[in-house]
Amino acid sequence: MKRWMDVKFWIVLAIILGLVLGFDHPDAPNMLIITLMLQMTLALQGLKFDFSDMKENRKGVIFSLILCFVLNSGITLLTGLLFIDDEALWYGWVMLASVPCAISVMTTAFYLKGDMKLSMLAFSSIYIVALVITPVLTHILMGEAASWLKILEYVLLFVIIPVLIDIPLNRITIPPMVKTMTMNIILLCMVFISVGFRRDYIIDNPDVALWLLAANMIRIFVPCFVLLFILKKLGCKKDRGVVYCAMATWRNSGLATTLCIVMFSTTFPNALLPAVLSLMVENLWFVIFQGTFDKLWPDEKNNVQTA
């Protein structure tokens, strides 16, 4: 039973199945957005906060916004400049840099005993800000190649539907084991669809795939672990450090993949590759981060909260 509850098992299984079986299905974008909304619905279910919580966590929320849209987006765009000669791949990097963090930042906080209240407040604030930043940034960097109105529509869809579903769902209590298992299965579907959709191109063009993989590994692993040691050195509380590291690392690669498929499936079909490879590396990062975080940041009784 322990293996079935371990998210690492499901992530590795999804990547293997995606590469072996593939999933070139015309409804893949719709399936992917459904899995993303289900994941968000479950992650938000049962969580409550009021305005006093926001006041108490104001600095942490602002810091999370900076990590997501300044540090993470900036590093992603700088990484994308390495591929700017390929218009499709550049557009893919722009889309990846423009989307907000993934709902998986809350999954990370959940699994690693992070500050769930801060995680939810920061996540909610990031998605409110994303309603402006995501369409504006894509329009500035891609012009008419991508419809900012369509992008706004999908971001709204991704936020509003889970919130509405959670209104009646919050009246019931979902057992932790059931919730964890369901989230694992949803994650399996999301990773499988994303990896499997362009599996043939990845296999036929291993050189491009390897460059994208290497770029994403540097983009994801280096800032995260540098930030971890800085936060630890500054005396940040461990449960908040989990949230900050996730905000600085995990973009909504699933949403970026979906938007690339919707926007560029006929004009720039390879635009989704940076997001697909990002999704793979982010999940690999989570497997490693989950296994090493407590060793790199052991519990201390006298941590001082700074951010």
Image: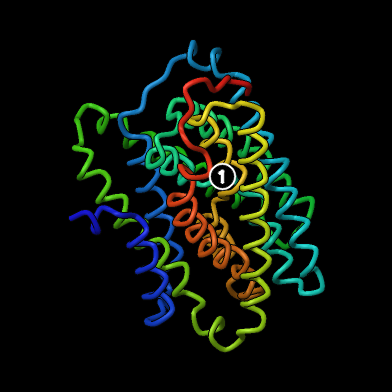
Total numbered circles: 1
Image quadrant assignment for residue 113 = top left
Image quadrant assignment for residue 14 = bottom left
At 67% from the left edge and 49% from the top edge, which residue is drawn?
Answer: 223
Q: Is residue 257 left or right of residue 47?
A: right
Q: Given the image, on which type of amino acid does mark 1 rest?
A: Cys
Where residue 129 appears, as percent x and y from the top left, is 63, 34
Where residue 193 appears, as percent x and y from the top left, is 41, 68
The answer to which of 229 and 282 lies nearer the viewer is 229
In this view, the residue farthest toward the bottom is 204
At 42% from the left edge and 30% from the top edge, which residue is drawn?
Answer: 116
At 37% from the left edge and 81% from the top edge, which residue is drawn?
Answer: 21
**Residue 143 visible, this angle:** no
Vertically, is 185 above or below 74?
Answer: below
Q: Is residue 184 left or right of residue 143?
A: left
Q: Secondary structure at mark 1?
A: loop
Residue holding disc 1: 101
Mark 1, Cα crowd under 10 Å, few <14 / some 14-19 / many 20+, is many
Quadrant where the N terminus sits is bottom left
Vertically, is 190 above or below 71?
Answer: below
**Residue 167 visible, this angle:** yes
Image quadrant assignment for residue 260 = bottom right
Vertically, is 203 above or below 213?
Answer: below
